Image (cartoon, helix red, strand yellow):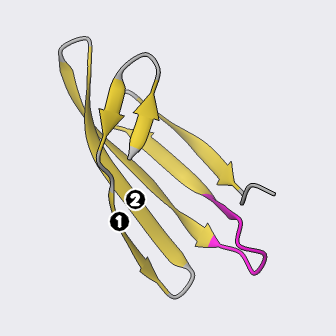
Amino acid sequence: DYVSSQYGKFPIAGTLKGTDVVMSFQMNVEGNSLNVTYSGKVEKDGSMKGSVTYGDMMSGTFSASLKK
């Protein structure tokens, strides 16, 4: 699940093929439906990095790592 303190909780669907990962979910922001997609690669250390799009509103990059 994607959890936002401001907008709530949304179920995530995704795929992992080799090192390519894609995760997506749909959320509502102030009455507007947004399709959010994270696309990236899983690194050898288990971390991930790539790009994210929030519908037609905005895009950017992300990075993630395992909690130690």
Q: Is mark 1 on a helix, strand or loop?
A: strand
Label 2 to label 1, Cα distance in Å? 4 Å
Q: Which residue is drawn at 71% across and 75% down?
A: 43
Span highlighted in magenta in the image = 42-49
Q: Is mark 2 on a helix, strand or loop?
A: strand
The percent position of residue 37, horizontal first and vertical second, equals 38, 50
User: In the rendered structure, does residue 53 fall within the stretch colored magenta?
Assistant: no
Picture layout, residue 7 above or below residue 58: above
Q: What residue type is labelled 1?
A: Gly
Q: Quadrant of the C terminus?
A: bottom right
Q: Do the residues under discs 2 and 1 have CB atoms within 8 angstroms?
A: yes
Q: Which residue is drawn at 78% across and 75% down?
A: 45
Q: Name the residue under label 1.
A: 14
Residue 46 quadrant = bottom right
Residue 27 visible in the shown view: yes
Q: Which residue is drawn at 48% across and 70% down?
A: 21
The percent position of residue 31, horizontal first and vertical second, equals 18, 14
Secondary structure character of the magenta stretch overall: loop
Q: Nearer the viewer, residue 27 or 37?
A: 27
Q: Nearer the viewer, residue 3 or 51?
A: 3
Q: Which amino acid does label 2 sit on?
A: Met
Q: Residue 23 carries which label?
A: 2
Left or right of 42, for residue 56: left
Picture layout, residue 24 above or below residue 41: above
The mark nearer the N terminus, 2 or 1, is: 1
The percent position of residue 32, horizontal first and vertical second, equals 20, 20
